[in-house]
Image (cartoon, rainbow, N blue to C red):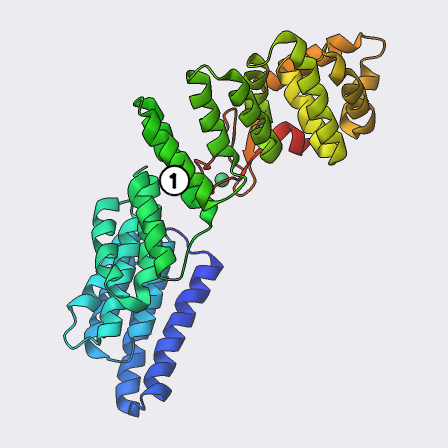
């Protein structure tokens, strides 16, 4: 057995003490029974200490049959095994509980939920799905089970089912953030676009917008449709709105946006983006400058002033600026652009997952809208 961290030992001991005290105080066990009960628990603990986890588990499982008052202790032990990744042992505990005769309905339901969580932890998604569907029938556990199912369907990229779970959670009074439902609709719209089903994609994007206002992802997809339908002005308008609403996509979408605009109108568009960023805060301006550098736009006239402003105000960039000495500004900008092209460009604000590609949902921790332009954040 791998060495237990102190917290795990604390939890095991706490579980045992709870079991012992429950046996003594909660249900008024008589002393001789308590002594036997304590002895059995201590034997189990001794097996744990002497690194014989399976013998320890056998001892604890026997106690399930012998003692009606130790259920919570076993639930605590099962949860502890699951957290430690020893899912087989957690499953044995919860199956033993379920097999017990005369188990009260609420304990049976709790054991079923725990067994579903064990299978989820083990990555056995199909089995976990079936168990959570059974738990859904239990009113007091329905929201927990529906949310777990929503997570399973997300992991399987079954966006239609995930959206259905979102709706059912809303009906159960426990809705996840509406932006999550909008993302599901956008995932489905992306698949519809891939199949060439434009009308279906439009319908899903309307649905996404109805879930939450100001949803940039839907506008980016709608811009793709406009571009396919030879409406570059509409596509540019949508994209411009999207990069203002969701500046984290600026680096990816700015080159795309500029491709949609005629040469003469480009400077006007850039000047508008600069003015908007300047009216917000410095990090917005820096984000725009980094996106412009990555897009090799350092030479564009409307960006010249902001580039110098960012380079002189930002401490880290100012050092680079000074170290470069009399080197031409364009050369420094070009070298920074080359560095940006090689760097990790995005990072998840929740788990730190970093990469060169932007994700609406983090592949590491599955959070939505957690990606940020890394270079901008790092140098902030
Ligand atoms: Zn993450």
Residue occupying image coordinates x 38% and y 40%:
184
Q: Residues within 10 Å of mark 1 (few under 14, many from 20)?
A: many
Q: Measured along the vertical axis of the image, is residue 217 above or below residue 210?
A: above
Q: Position of residue 128 (x, y in %)?
A: 25, 51
Q: Measured along the vertical axis of the image, is residue 7 above or below residue 235?
A: below
Q: Observer-nearest residue: 364 or 19?
A: 364
Mark 1, secondary structure of its residue = helix
Q: Position of residue 307 (x, y in %)?
A: 76, 20
Evaluate whether residue 1 shows in this view: no
Q: Measured along the vertical axis of the image, is residue 287 above or below residue 37?
A: above
Instruction: Please give the count of numbered marks on the rendered protein.
Output: 1
Residue occupying image coordinates x 59% and y 26%:
240
Q: Position of residue 284 (x, y in %)?
A: 69, 32
Q: Quadrant of the C terminus?
A: top right
| Residue 92 in the figure: left or right of residue 12 | left
Residue occupying image coordinates x 32% and y 68%:
140
Evaluate whether residue 98 shows in this view: yes
| Residue 374 in the figure: left or right of residue 326 | left
Residue occupying image coordinates x 31% and y 21%:
196
Q: Observer-nearest residue: 294 or 7?
A: 294
Residue assigned mark 1 = 184
Q: Is mark 1 within 8 Å of ligand 1?
A: no
Q: Position of residue 300 (x, y in %)?
A: 72, 12
Q: Observer-nearest residue: 98 or 226?
A: 226
């Amino acid at each position: 057995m791998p060495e237990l961290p102190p917290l795990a030992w604390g939890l095991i001991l706490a579980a045992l003490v709870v079991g012992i005290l429950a046996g003594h105080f909660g249900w008024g066990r008589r002393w001789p029974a308590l002594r036997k009960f304590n002895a059995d628990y201590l034997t189990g603990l001794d097996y744990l200490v002497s690194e014989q986890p399976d013998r320890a588990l056998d001892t604890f499982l026997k106690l399930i049959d012998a003692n009606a008052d130790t259920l919570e202790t076993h639930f605590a032990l099962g949860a502890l095994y699951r957290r430690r990744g020893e899912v087989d042992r957690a499953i044995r505990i919860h199956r033993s509980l379920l097999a017990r005769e005369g188990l009260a309905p609420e304990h049976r339901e709790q054991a079923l939920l725990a067994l579903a969580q064990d299978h989820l932890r083990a990555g056995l998604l199909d089995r976990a799905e079936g168990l959570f569907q059974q738990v859904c029938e239990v009113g007091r556990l329905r929201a927990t089970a529906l949310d777990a199912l929503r997570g399973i369907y997300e992991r399987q990229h079954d966006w239609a089912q995930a959206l259905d779970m979102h709706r059912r959670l809303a009906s159960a009074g426990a809705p996840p953030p509406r932006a999550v439902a909008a993302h599901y609709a956008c995932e489905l719209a992306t698949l519809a676009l891939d199949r060439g089903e434009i009308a279906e994609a439009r319908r899903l994007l309307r649905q996404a917008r109805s879930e939450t206002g100001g949803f940039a992802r839907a506008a980016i997809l709608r811009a793709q449709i406009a571009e396919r339908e030879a409406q570059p002005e509409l596509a540019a308008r949508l994209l411009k709105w999207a990069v203002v609403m969701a500046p984290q996509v600026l680096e990816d979408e700015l080159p795309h946006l500029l491709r949609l605009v005629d040469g003469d109108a480009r400077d006007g568009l850039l000047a508008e983006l600069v003015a908007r960023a300047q009216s917000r805060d410095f990090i917005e301006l820096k984000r725009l400058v980094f996106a412009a550098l990555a897009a090799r736009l350092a030479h564009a006239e409307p960006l010249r002033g902001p580039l110098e402003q960012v380079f002189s105000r930002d401490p880290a960039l100012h050092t680079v600026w000074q170290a470069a000495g009399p080197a031409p500004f364009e050369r420094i900008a070009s070298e920074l652009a080359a560095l940006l092209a090689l760097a990790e460009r995005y990072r998840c604000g929740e788990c730190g997952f970093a990469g060169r590609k932007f994700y609406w949902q983090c592949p590491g921790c599955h959070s939505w809208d957690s990606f940020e332009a890394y270079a901008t954040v790092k140098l902030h």
